Image (cartoon, rainbow, N blue to C red):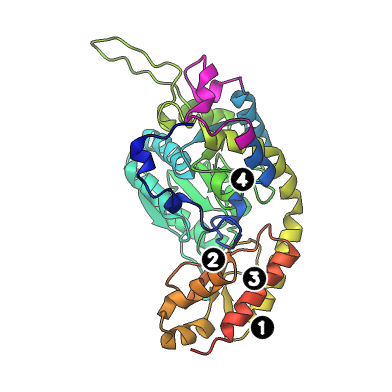
Amino acid sequence: MSVSPEFSAMDVGNLSYRYKDFIIINPLMRGGIVPKSVTERLCDEGWLEVGYNLCHDCIEGRSSLITKPNVKEFLSEIAVFFGGDEAEHTFGCRAAQFAVMKTISEVSPDGVVLSDPNSHYSTNIAAEMCGLKVVESPHTGYPEYKVEVDSVIEKIEEIGNPALVVMTHADPYYGNLAPVKEIGKVCAEKEIPYMVNSAYTGGVMPINMKDLNADFLTLSAHKSMASIGPLGFLVTTYEWSRKVFALSKSKPDWTGRAFGKKIPNVFGCSIGGLPLVCAMNSFPYVKERVKKWDEEINKTNKFIDAMEDLGDIMLLGERPHRHHLLHFETPLFWEISKKHRRKGFFLAEEMIKRGIVGLHKGLSKHIKLSVYGLSDEEVSKVLEAFKEVAEISA
């Protein structure tokens, strides 16, 4: 392959992925680790050679309708797997949330969205973009920060039935599982539209949106479905699909053009390239791994005990923990950082020296991590590394 002079002049070495052989413990990444067999297939089959590689055989003018390979069938499988009726792929989970918010804003202009207080910022941004006001129910505060059903019900009654209730299934701060099923039952009884943001759960644990009484389920392929990003999915019911996946009615006055196959709420046509191909290849693996969720949670809680045994370290969030995202309060490392020449950066840097990457650089008072999908040997290596770092004498 020839390389242009401009590209040849670049320091190509700086483009290499320096953490290739490291153990990743970043909780935003663990559920998105792409199986080696899939990465090999993507390379061997030439999927990396062009950007929108699925679009060669697009007939209908929308990537979700492509049948070679069968994206249309894949999206049907996604809907069934998560207990919904219809699904579309989106530019990340945030775009799926936007589609829901936009739909709700058309049904209830200037409406109020009731959200949990541990929601991802993208939930609030999506509502803001659509002119909706977000009101939060409280959590229980330090050290568990739990969302409780009664608090949500009280807020619903205070608002007088919001235009939409949004619950973050597992939150990105403490890894708490919200009582999504119980809240869904309340929303169904009151006929309030209900969205569950499962960016951190869909693809790592079993989920059926019908069991949750959810009208909308938003998913993140690169956070929890073993895929390259950015890619998300919106799964919904037949009833809501007619609104949220409504086709374009636009017809400019000069050209008279029509875009009748495009879905405005997903920006007409969504990703037709590598992230979608990757998610399609990883899906059989994802369907199998959710069956091992109980094993993963047992491993996670054993890891919590071992971390707290190191000394002045405490898990924040609910106990027993029911999700793989972990947030520890770590005075042990904070005290070391006060005297260490690298200050708060020492912890992440020392772990990197030991082949483990993913802690937020600059933080030592609190850390977030995950051992989801790691082997027992890898978990032992992570624990041993933390033990060694805890014994550092600044």
Lower position in the chain sequence, tag 4 or tag 1: 4
Q: Where residue 204 sits in the image (x, y, percent)?
A: 66, 51
Residue at mark 3: 382
Tag 2 and tag 1, C-beta contact below 8 Å: no
On the image, the x and y values in percent for residue 178 come to 58, 58
Instruction: Tell me which label, 2 or 1, sits earlier in the chain.
Output: 2
Sequence-wise first label, 3 or 2:
2
Q: Nearer the viewer, mark 3 or mark 1?
A: 3
Element marked by disc 2 = loop
Residue 270 picture location, percent across and down: 46, 30
- According to the picture, the residue beneath numbered tag 2 turns out to be 174
Q: Amino acid at mark 3?
A: Val
Q: Which residues are magenta?
A: 43-68
In space, the residues marked 3 and 2 are separated at their CA atoms by 20 Å
Residue carrying label 1:
309
Tell me the residue that label 4 is attached to: 225
SS for tag 4?
loop
Please determine whether, in this image, residue 341 is positioned above or below residue 203: below
Left-right relation of 345 to 378: left
Q: CA distance from mark 2 to mark 1?
A: 20 Å
